Amino acid sequence: MSNLRRHLAFLVLGALGLIILPYFISSRFYIDVLTLIFFTAYLGQSWNILGGYAGQFSFGGVMFFGTGAYVSSILLTTFGFPPIFGIFLAILGGAFLGLIVGYMSFRSGLKGSYFALITLAFAELLRVLANSVEFTGGGVGLFLTYAPGLSNLQFETPVGFYYFALVLMFISIAIVYWLEGSRFGAQLVAIRENEDAAEALGIDTLRCKIYAIMIMGAMGGAAGTFYSQKYLYLDPPIAYSIHLSVEMLLVTIVGGMGTIFGPLVGAFVLHTVNEVARHFIDTPGLSLIVYGLILIIIIGYLPNGLIGAFKKKEKKSGSNSLDKKRSREES
Amino acid sequence: MISASLSMLPAAIINGFMYGAIYALVALGLTLIYGVLHIINFAHGAMLMLALYAAFFLFDLFNIDPYFSILIVTPCAFIFGYLIYRYGIGSLAKGKDQNILLITLGLSIIIENGALFFFSGDQQTVNLTYGFEAFDLGFMYLSYPKVISFFAALLMCAILWAAMSLTDLGRAIRAVAKERQGARLVGINVEHIFAVTFGIGIACLGAAGCMMLPIFYVDPYTGNIFVLVAFTIVVLGGMGSVVGALVGGFIIGITESVGGLLLGESLGQIGISLIFILILIFRPTGLFGSKV
């Protein structure tokens, strides 16, 4: 409990720092980078709930983002429905998609790599559909008009979007913070550690996993509205890009799966690496090569991510022997 | 519109067969790796893309015919696969299923963007002297490269099948696939066999890349197209099943070309992901698989 309270103090201080930060940064560039970091951290957090806590890795997390983006953008362009309400329908849309995908795949007992691949296929399916039907604008895409104002969730300055992304990220941290102390969170962790045992203890694992993917979907839906209102353009390759699916799992794994701040740490580190690499050699592909290397190194040597690496230093003996025991059991 | 489509149906089916044989070869590599090592190689598409580039550069720089390149690229792909498993994937993954998926995902990101970095994002194709010559079947023309690739792919599948069932190495591989501990007890070097199997799987890609180059293009993202195709074939045919990979390859090849004909360019692509999802949900063992 004291651990959570220490977190809370840290959380409030950090939050205050981030809130007043734009008053000290005049460069548009840094504000944009920070906005992107919060946005990726937010998406990573959505992946973290299903992947980090419940242990169900998805390779198609982008499908919720894309669907949410289409829901609010189509409502706006076709019916003039203001995005400030549209974002809630995007959230509902994402959660509903989560329900469908979760029900179909978890009910058939898909787990591990199979679950990862089927989410990839769902995202691909939606991309093809979005490309083929009329109301999404097909391959041409959707163009949104720029009309700043809170009801449109568009802002005149980058700082406006900075706060938008910051609010999203705070909400995501609050959700995971709640999860850590809740019964539901404990059930997800039980599923991750040993699903059969969890089932035997009377946990409704199917229901828990579906709830987790619905939360992930709801969060992804809101991210879609954020993206389309910021960039004012949407087409199927953007809405359902595999790169975003990879990015959300990447930041979470790098930072530390199943931790509150893992996605934020991961997003911060990866975006910093990206910007530094771009500063020296501005050739397409380079930063992603580095991402791939980081992913492999983290999986191979730091399975608990950067946060796990720091924690391990704090209490070396206990966790180490547990790790050894676990790896022996698996081999 | 519909009647015009129907009259083109036989041509679409035959085209599907032609591509299906090559898809089968790609999927064979994946299913072999899965059947023996029980790992899913997410970098399969990216490695196929590398093979296509290898064949492309052999043609572009040394003017070597892609079909002749099979003899060069396939052994190189084997060595590449062997080394990358032995000193990369195998030692890093520590035996966890999801770790391997993520490591091969990382690998595919590195390969894809490495290709973008070194070879640029431009689409590359080769112009063969016989590239535009074709057999006249009466109702359609079938280009030479498609026919050659079809038979070359079938031949490769046959060679692989014979090697797996007739040689000592194939016997050792099958032993490791069936009973890891038992194979170790009778003196088979399991780690070596794992790496050899991975090498053979990648060698299939090397050959497939050379056969594909005359009828496809290559760019750094080509692998993305085939990774889902290959997975679909493998789950359709049954993970680890050689016959399944062959049949699955034909089914997917035909689905793709007939789907493209009847549903149009854009919606036609839906067949592959749809089949993938339906198979995983309703028959995860595939058509020929016995266990998951």
Image (spheres, rainbow, N blue to C red):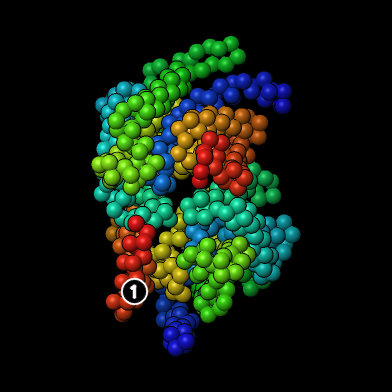
Which residue is located at x 60 percent, y 14 percent? Answer: B139
Position of residue A119 measured from the top left corner of the image (x, y, whole percent):
55, 53
Which residue is located at x 63 percent, y 53 percent? Answer: A104
Look at the image and tell me whether residue A328 can be seen. Answer: yes
Q: How many marks?
A: 1
Quick one: label 1, few (<14), some, or many (20+) residues within 10 Å? Answer: few
Look at the image and tell me whether residue B192 can be seen. Answer: no
Task: Using the rendered view, name the quadrant where residue B286 is placed.
Answer: top right
Task: Using the rendered view, name the quadrant where residue B203 is placed.
Answer: top left
Position of residue A195 measured from the top left corner of the image (x, y, whole percent):
52, 63
Left or right: B141 in relation to B219: right
Q: Chain of mark 1?
A: A
Quick check: A230 above or below B12? below
Residue nearest the observer in this picture, A169 or A218: A218
For mark 1, what is the residue? Answer: A319
Left or right: A228 in relation to B225: right
Q: Secondary structure at mark 1?
A: helix
Image quadrant holding the C terminus of chain A, namely bottom left
Which residue is located at x 37 percent, y 28 percent? Answer: B165
Position of residue B211 measured from the top left corner of the image (x, y, whole percent):
40, 27
